[in-house]
Image (spheres, coloured by chain):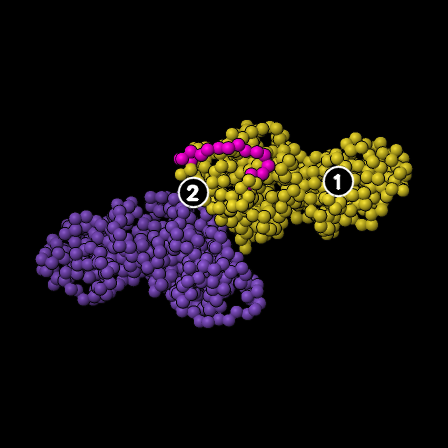
Chain colours: A yellow, B purple
Amino acid sequence: MHTRVGGQVPAGDRRAGQDSAGCAGARCGAGAPLGLCRPRLCAAMAEEKPLTVVTCTAPVNIAVIKYWGKRDEELILPINSSLSVTLHQDQLKTTTTAAISRDFKEDRLWLNGEEADVGHPRLQSCLREMRRLARKRRGGSAGAAAPLSLAYKVHVASVNNFPTAAGLASSAAGYACLVHTLARLYGVEGELSEVARQGSGSACRSMLGGFAQWLMGERPDGKDSIAQQVAPEMHWPELRVLILVVSAEKKPVGSTAGMQTSVDTSPLLKHRAEAVVPERMAQMIQFIRQRDFEGFGQLTMKDSNQFHATCLDTFPPIFYLNDVSRRIIALAHRFNAHHGKTKVAYTFDAGPNAVVFTLADTVDEFVEVVKGSFPPESNGDQFLKGLPAGPASLSDELLSTVVLEPVPGAIRYILLTKPGPGPQPLDDPNLHLLGADGLPRSSA
Amino acid sequence: MHTRVGGQVPAGDRRAGQDSAGCAGARCGAGAPLGLCRPRLCAAMAEEKPLTVVTCTAPVNIAVIKYWGKRDEELILPINSSLSVTLHQDQLKTTTTAAISRDFKEDRLWLNGEEADVGHPRLQSCLREMRRLARKRRGGSAGAAAPLSLAYKVHVASVNNFPTAAGLASSAAGYACLVHTLARLYGVEGELSEVARQGSGSACRSMLGGFAQWLMGERPDGKDSIAQQVAPEMHWPELRVLILVVSAEKKPVGSTAGMQTSVDTSPLLKHRAEAVVPERMAQMIQFIRQRDFEGFGQLTMKDSNQFHATCLDTFPPIFYLNDVSRRIIALAHRFNAHHGKTKVAYTFDAGPNAVVFTLADTVDEFVEVVKGSFPPESNGDQFLKGLPAGPASLSDELLSTVVLEPVPGAIRYILLTKPGPGPQPLDDPNLHLLGADGLPRSSA
């Protein structure tokens, strides 16, 4: 929600995009920010260095049909469609506060408490695009003078509740959150996945809850390269997601640079994008609609492996999986073989951490198997984070055929979560990351 | 050379395939084995449990365009052509002794001193095929009665001077050696790569020295799926080969099972075989003919990476590279980047060991770089085996940009070798692996 810090707007009383039409620039005076103020507050603005503030959260998503490679680097248009599961924000989220004020001298950005370069081209793309949409919207509805407040500078602060650059698609949640927050700040509605896509490709999928596909589109201008929901988060209530955090080291090759090298050098990637993915997209949508875990899990694993195969076919080759990742893969296959069906399915992004899909009835046992295979070293009581799991006793046969050669400490912790909704407003003004002065709160 | 143990034939005085026409069965009596005896020895055979013995050595080869996947499992017909460098037998070889005697009760086999199952289908394929060719040859030249000696049982002993199943293509050298040895024993000449292929696909390339291609062929009977020499071993005298032995652990998935799973499950392997390899074969032959190390090295690395990519695209995925392999890959790319050109080129088979091609003028420096990156733990004086290397001092810039984060003990040793000739006879009867009793010598 957007909140006027200077004017004590009760949290949650209005929603961006619902009120802006009723707050035309002329009624607020020249100082009114973009019609987001409420008329009764306008008078107070000049004295109190008025600030319009909005805070939202946005989710991480994990692709089950992978995106790797752009056909247009400027607009971030992919060489193939992709499909992901949006993870629940109770466990993983980005929180972003955006504020505008006529007193701000320049656009500024803080990431995880540290001031960052606001001139980053992709951030600028999103800012420019959101301001353009706001201008268009105002122009369309009021049809008159350009709103001065669009020239106001913006302050943005963003934090993740998980380590960045560990292959957990932090940029996806980050840009989805930025775009969603700016949209509420500027009162912009409609198709926003296209804007988020220009920040980080996979961010467009984080604009939706549940199961989302990113259609690659065909148009050169990218207007049809957008995210669509395949199914909402409650479609498959038994689905669970375990993130096996192998390492929080910074990944060796960033995905942006990596995928472009792949496009330039990998013959296999080109074939994958053209000949393999279209069929897999259709299959995956079917599996999800039918809640077919066998099909969903097998295809998820195959597509993860094929993505990493194209990384290896890149020159110089790119490696995101390490020996621990490979042990997790082998463990998952042994676990499924033991059960005679697909009970767990791994997928890996641009880092060594595993994301494992399973169903609620398998969680307890698999957590126990992971504990046995990668015995926690120091943080035994904190090994499982997120949703709770119950105790499970493993059969002797499972222990002897699945839990082989334990590697203590190789997995730092497990985060248990499930599919979740798309970006959400944060109504509590105490949760804004920027204070009344428009700077990060010391407590943030 | 074949030698009659019972009859004191001077070593090296005759060559199989040259003498057999002059030793027809009738002249030796019913007991003469396959015409390999010399008439003056025939009389002694009955009393002395005569034995005809041949010992040969055969080389390892390392593919630079990889073979992975069969279109016919029985005949071992590949889904794509491949190309390899034959390594010098001064460093790596299989030695095989084959003996026949009318006193042998059954075919027997010893591998590295241990008796092994002679009924292995592929071994039987080679034995059957060699006996068929021998029969055909006798039938063709003598045109008369079937030689009884073809029914004699054979004893075969084979040893490698390197660890088996460590991704060093021991089966290739093994089957090449078997077929070459049996050919000399039975006096068979002509196209033998087709027989070796039926033992182990890549064995057909070990039948030739220097640079050999294995043409995939088109015929269903495999008669055109044979090895051809691209260039002899002295064509590129500066070329050197370093084998970085990472581990002698047994590989997790054997290549026979692995490649068939790949054929069945990897969409990328099919594309590689059909659309990528044909062009690469032509390019690689050009690079070798022109002694173009830049082209040869780059394509060698790319093709190794693509092979391992198709392993990863297999389901369940197959991993042969481990974290040390990946460190070697990164090291090679840093080394080349430092020099601004391709000075070293890695390739990996079905195991973690790296095979690195380079030119003579780079050996000393690269060995020093490997020593610095993977400091020997206990065997510092034996770290480099095979051909000698000289001292080299590394520049500060090279040390600071190439030799990063040393991992002590990760490489067990380096074996330095170079391209070499095809299978060779061993003339010294003291080197036979089987004694006068047809059993492995205790000293073997």
Which residue is under mark 1? A432
Q: Residue at x 87, y 42 (%)?
A: A48
Q: Position of residue A315 (x, y in %)?
A: 54, 54
Which residue is under mark 2? A404
Image quarter of residue A68: top right
The magenta-colored residue range is A383-398
Residue closest to the eye, A409 or B420: A409
Amino acid residing under circle 1: His
Label 1 neighbourhood size at 10 Å, few (<14), some (14-19), many (20+)? many
Q: Is residue B218 visible?
A: no
Left or right: residue A125 versus residue B65 is: right
- Real-space Cα separation, disc 2 to disc 1, in angstroms: 48 Å
Q: Residue at x 16, y 51 (%)?
A: B104
Q: Residue at x 46, y 65 (%)?
A: B367
Element type where label 1 sits in the image: loop
Q: Position of residue B187 (x, y in %)?
A: 22, 57
